[in-house]
Amino acid sequence: MGFAVKRVYEPAAPDDGYRVLVDRLWPRGLKKEHAAIDLWAKELAPSTVLRQWFGHDPARWEGFRHRYAGELDGAAEYWRPLLARAAHHRVTLLYGARDEAHNNAVALKAYLDDRLAADGAA
């Protein structure tokens, strides 16, 4: 089934499958009881230093993606279970940022899609 990306403020849908918040900080104004989140994977969020460096500046996007991938390389124990689930079910990565194209969930999805394809080819 694979991975999808969605803003956490959008309503949950049945085709979201397993919903995973991938932000280190809880989204502003969102009550936990209304979040419809199956897992809050803070460990998969960029480090505070990287998040602050990026600052959602599109000019830093490629550098952010590269540095974030380096962080994720050392966090396989947190993303491997999501790969296993995504092989058979939809996993939706949720984020709170306003920018729908330049955020950690988009970068994480690309990283995980690459790993899923590599696992499928093995």
Image (cartoon, rainbow, N blue to C red):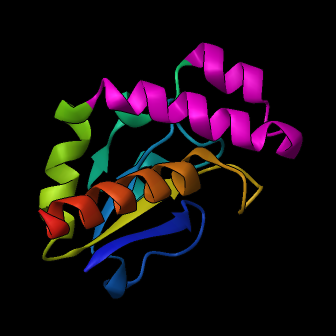
- From the viewer's side, name the closer residue of 59 and 25: 59
Residue 116: x and y in percent read 26, 62
- Residue 25 located left or right of residue 17: right
31 relative to 74, above or below: below
**Quarter placement of the C terminus:** bottom left
Q: Residue at x 26, y 56 (%)?
A: 38
- Judge whether residue 110 can be spotted in this image: yes
**Quarter placement of the N terminus:** bottom left
Magenta region, mostly helix, strand or loop? Answer: helix
- From the viewer's side, name the closer residue of 114 and 52: 114
Residue 105: x and y in percent read 53, 52
- Residue 16 located left or right of residue 116: right
- From the viewer's side, name the closer residue of 89 and 74: 74
Residue 41: x and y in percent read 33, 39
19 relative to 57, above or below: below
119 relative to 80, above or below: below
Q: Residue furthest top?
A: 49
Q: Residue at x 34, y 30 (%)?
A: 73
- Look at the image and say whether residue 59 sits in the magenta stretch: yes
**Image quarter of residue 25:** top right
60 relative to 71, above or below: below
Q: Residue at x 30, y 73 (%)?
A: 2
Q: How many numbered circles does the render carry?
A: 0
- The span picked out in magenta is 48-75
Q: Residue at x 75, y 20 (%)?
A: 53
**Image quarter of residue 59:** top right
Residue 80: x and y in percent read 18, 45
